[in-house]
């Protein structure tokens, strides 16, 4: 399930086909003459390089234009699988989880579709309870990452079932493993939300459109030219390399967002409810 819709960008990104940018990239290395089309074999090689390049870009946070909030209902399991056909069904298995939180559904699951109802913020709701909260209002609690499998393995009571506070993500293939801890109960009480990088295009064909924001077109062409040059017995020229760096820096400037700096829990005298050996050197 996915809570965030990246929107329809076809009107902004339509304009170039894969074959267009592959042909331009080949011309930057002097292989194709002006106004000529690449041969089927050269075009096929260029498309293959493009797909491999986009797969590499997918693993760099600053190369992905959007983060997506995906989720599943907690069922009391210790492991939730992430990827195509998993508990959290997404087309590309994420290499990392960039943030996570648990949503407590105080209304017993009426918000299980992941969206807030307009009634959740009805001012009349806030006079019903002494605590000032509507019983229909879900509450989100951030989950702190356990950074390594070794730290997760060091947990003495992995089956502890109570209020979730931490998570460990193992980027296994073909399905990643999301392990909340302590384990939240099932019964339409909790949702587990993950922030992951939005999938870039993959398995492109020569006739497919490049469905990326316009600032990516230049980066695709120049970076692809640098990748293709060795296939034709050349080194990427200084001009090609310079333009590729400039195009990538533009994307980095647009996409990069630095989260708030965290402080190790051991340096904070409060809000440290759990401890295990090695915690003092972790960002928990």
Image: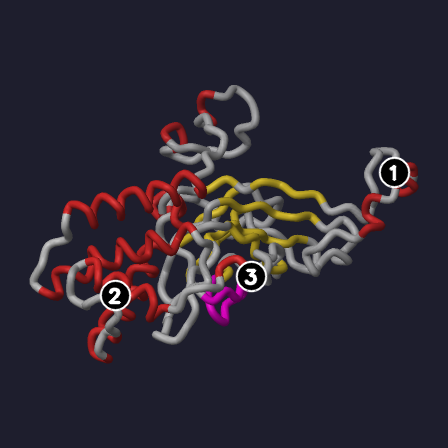
Q: Which residue shows up at 41% across the image and 72% down it?
A: 208
225 relative position to 116: left or right: left
The residue that appears at 65% across and 58% down in the rendered structure is: 186
* Viewer-side residue, 73 vs 231: 231
In-image side of 205 versus 181 (left or right): left
Density class for disc 3 (Cα within 10 Å; few <14, some 14-19, many ≥20) is few
Quadrant hosting residue 8? bottom right
Secondary structure mostly seen in the magenta stretch: loop
Q: Position of residue 111 (x, y in %)?
A: 74, 56
* Chain-order first, disc 2 or disc 1: 2
Query: What mark, if any, has residue 49 been given in the picture?
Result: 2
Q: Nearer the viewer, mark 3 or mark 2?
A: 3
Label annotation for residue 11: 3
Query: Toward the viewer: 278 or 132?
Result: 132
Tell me which segment is drawn in magenta.
82-91
Sooner in the amino-acid sequence: mark 1 or mark 3: 3
Q: Magenta segment: does it hold 198?
A: no
Q: Calculate the distance from the C-alpha at mark 2 to the C-alpha at mark 1.
A: 57 Å
């Amino acid at each position: 399930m996915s809570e965030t819709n990246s929107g329809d960008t076809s009107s902004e990104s339509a304009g170039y086909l894969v074959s267009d940018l592959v042909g331009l990239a080949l011309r930057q290395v002097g292989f194709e003459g002006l106004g000529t089309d690449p041969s089927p074999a050269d075009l096929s090689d260029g498309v293959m390089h493009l797909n491999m390049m986009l797969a590499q870009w997918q693993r760099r946070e600053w190369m992905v234009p959007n983060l997506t909030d995906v989720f599943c209902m907690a069922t009391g399991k210790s492991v939730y699988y992430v990827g195509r056909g998993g508990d959290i069904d997404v087309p590309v298995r994420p290499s990392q989880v960039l943030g996570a939180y648990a949503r407590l559904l105080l209304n017993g699951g009426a918000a299980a579709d992941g969206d807030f109802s307009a009634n959740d913020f009805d001012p009349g709701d806030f006079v019903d309870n002494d605590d000032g909260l509507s019983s229909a209002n879900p509450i989100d609690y951030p989950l702190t990452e356990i950074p390594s499998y070794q730290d997760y393995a060091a947990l003495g009571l992995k089956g502890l079932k109570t209020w979730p506070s931490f998570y460990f993500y193992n980027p296994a293939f073909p399905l990643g493993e999301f392990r909340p801890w302590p384990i939240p109960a099932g019964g339409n009480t909790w949702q587990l939300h993950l922030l992951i990088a939005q999938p870039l295009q993959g398995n492109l064909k020569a006739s497919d459109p490049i469905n990326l924001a316009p600032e990516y077109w230049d980066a695709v062409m120049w970076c692809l030219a640098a990748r293709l040059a060795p296939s034709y017995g050349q080194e990427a020229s200084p001009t090609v390399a310079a333009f590729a760096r400039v195009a990538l820096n533009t994307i980095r400037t647009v996409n990069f967002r630095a989260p708030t700096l965290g402080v190790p829990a051991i340096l904070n005298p409060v809000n440290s409810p759990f401890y295990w050996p090695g915690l003092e050197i972790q960002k928990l």
